[in-house]
Image (spheres, coloured by chain):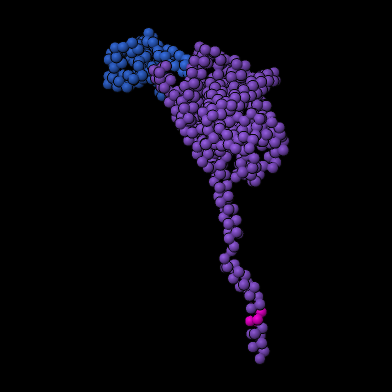
Amino acid sequence: MTKIEAVIQNSKLEAVKTALQEIGVEGMTVLEVRGHGRQKGHTEVYRGREYSVDLIPKTKIEMVLADAMVEKAVQAILGAARTGKIGDGKIFLSRVDEAIRIRNEERGEGAL
Amino acid sequence: MGQRLVAVGVTAVLILILTPNLSAQAAANSVPDTAARLARLERQATDAKSSADNAWMLTSAALVLMMTGPGLALFYSGLVRKKNVLGTMMQSFALMAVVTILWGLFGYSLCFGSGNSFIGGLENLFLKGVGAAPDPSYAATIPAQTFMVYQLMFAIITPSLIAGAFAERMKFSAMLIFTVLWSIIVYDPMAHMVWGKGGLLNASLGGKFPTLDFAGGTVVHVTSGVSALVCALYLGKRLGYPKQSMVPHSVVLSFIGACLLWVGWFGFNAGSALAAGSLATSAFVATHFAAASAAVGWAAAEWLRNGKASVLGGISGAVAGLVAITPASGFVKPMPAMMIGLIAGVFCYWMVSKVKSRFGYDDSLDAFGVHGAGGTLGAILTGVFAVSSVNPILKDTQSNTIASGLLEGNAYQLLNQLIGVSIAWGLAIVGTLAILKVVDLTVGLRVSTEEEVQGLDLSQHGEEGYYWETSA
């Protein structure tokens, strides 16, 4: 089982969700985050004083998938989230030791 | 025979009983004399005027209270960080209660009792003698109680303004003690000097240095604004200022507050006419035009300097204009009012953007930049633009009306304005410094570092302003 963490532009959330649903991904967790990679922030002027805002609002999607699904999901995210500009985000993959469904204690890929 | 006697007797008795009533009615139906009717009409006209004046003055009092709560409370708390929103609101709200009590006990007496040139006496302690009958020295057509409660609202908002300077770092207990002392030591004498019987600066009651201050440019804005500067310098900067970003957590709240201030200011300025006549209208109009042009002035200055006009700039500009027109409102015509507003908008923008960063003091919410500087500017410009055709307030020794301001031909009045402003500055600086020292030595002024990081809401009041966690 693999965990996919994708940090994407806020405006791309709907597109990514739709693309994932179309390929059969049934569960995900969405978080509102702030951060930056190489993308610079912006400057605000308040009472004549300049402040640089370098933590930019982003959206993070997390999901744990069966290994067979992973590459399809990654392609779906890439296709939906890309604009071609700096700030598009990143995808991280990591190994998951176990998954358990709380309702009936089902374990393994069946719990996903 | 006996029956006829009874009938005659009853008839006679009836006639005797009824005749006086009948004749009285006849007398009443005759035309009452003209003098009596005239006297009755005059009484009715005076009563009508009194009713109109009193209605307007009570409304004005309500408007001015609204300026503090929620006007100023919202304006200020929107500008601070989220963790201090309630603490900032509490500073305004607590004063609505505390100053009221002080006022009722002795504050009104110290301001408007007879006393001497500098402070009133104690003849109105516990509001003794302040009832339904008018006090002709102040306002001949409204109950003295109306005048008292109207002035109370000014006493409330003035110390509330100072909170803008020590926002986000003053202990609540210290603020309460500071305000009580400040009201007595700074506000009451200043109000007495400008508006009280025998006051040194009172233009309408024969003060030695008549200062034209219609609604409180010196009494309210200069005193609070300058005190604010003293507080900001004495307390020191907020942790992390100026490097750390401390942007307003809600310009939306500030916007609502500023609009309430604009509307409430009609009570502040036009109500200072103490009657519902044409002077109130004139002050109302001057107030509104100054606010408008000042908003434009500040926004334009910002647009030129930063490339964008911000909402915060626009509303700050409006407030600056309202501050500057406060002393002038009952003395100037609409076009000069617009001019005063425009100058104030640009000047105050320069004060808070250039001058503040140049000198580095942390006047968190620009109480000095807007109220202190704007009030000083307005008081001086009053001496320039005041005309006796709007308000024939200045008289010579033969009680003839003389020119009010520079453009009308009275250059000397500018000197009086400067004297009034200087006294306000001096009293504010000396008084505030003394009080800060005393409070610092007793309870301590500033919250601890941990409390400042945690925020006033939690550390001082045990509350959170917004509890938007999802909970079932």
Q: Against B460, is B128 above or below?
A: below
Q: Position of residue B153 (x, y in %)?
A: 59, 35
- Chain B, chosen colour in render: purple
Res B111 quadrant in image: top right
Residue A50 figure quarter: top left
Q: Position of residue B68 (x, y in %)?
A: 55, 32
Q: x and y percent of residue A11 in the render? A: 34, 20
| Left or right, residue B472 beside residue B235 | left
Which quadrant of the figure contains the N terminus of chain A?
top left
* Residue closer to the observer: B146 or A18: B146
Magenta residues, dominant SS class: helix
- Which chain appears blue? A
Q: Nearer the viewer, residue B389 or B331?
A: B389
Q: Residue furthest top?
A: A38
Image quarter hosting the C terminus of chain A: top left
Please tell me which residue is depicted at 59% across the width and 26% down the height of the picture: B412
Residue B60 appears in which quarter of the rendering? top right
Residue at 66% of width from left, 79% of height from top?
B13
Residue B97 image position (x, y, % from top left) = 62, 33
Can residue A93 be seen here? The reply is yes
Q: Which residues are magenta?
A: B10-14
> Residue at horizontal 56%, vertical 42%?
B275
Pick out the residue farthest to the bottom. B1
Q: Is residue B303 shown left or right of residue B261?
A: left
- Residue B467 is a magenta residue: no
Instruction: Mark yes or no: residue B215 visible.
Output: no
Total marks in image:
0
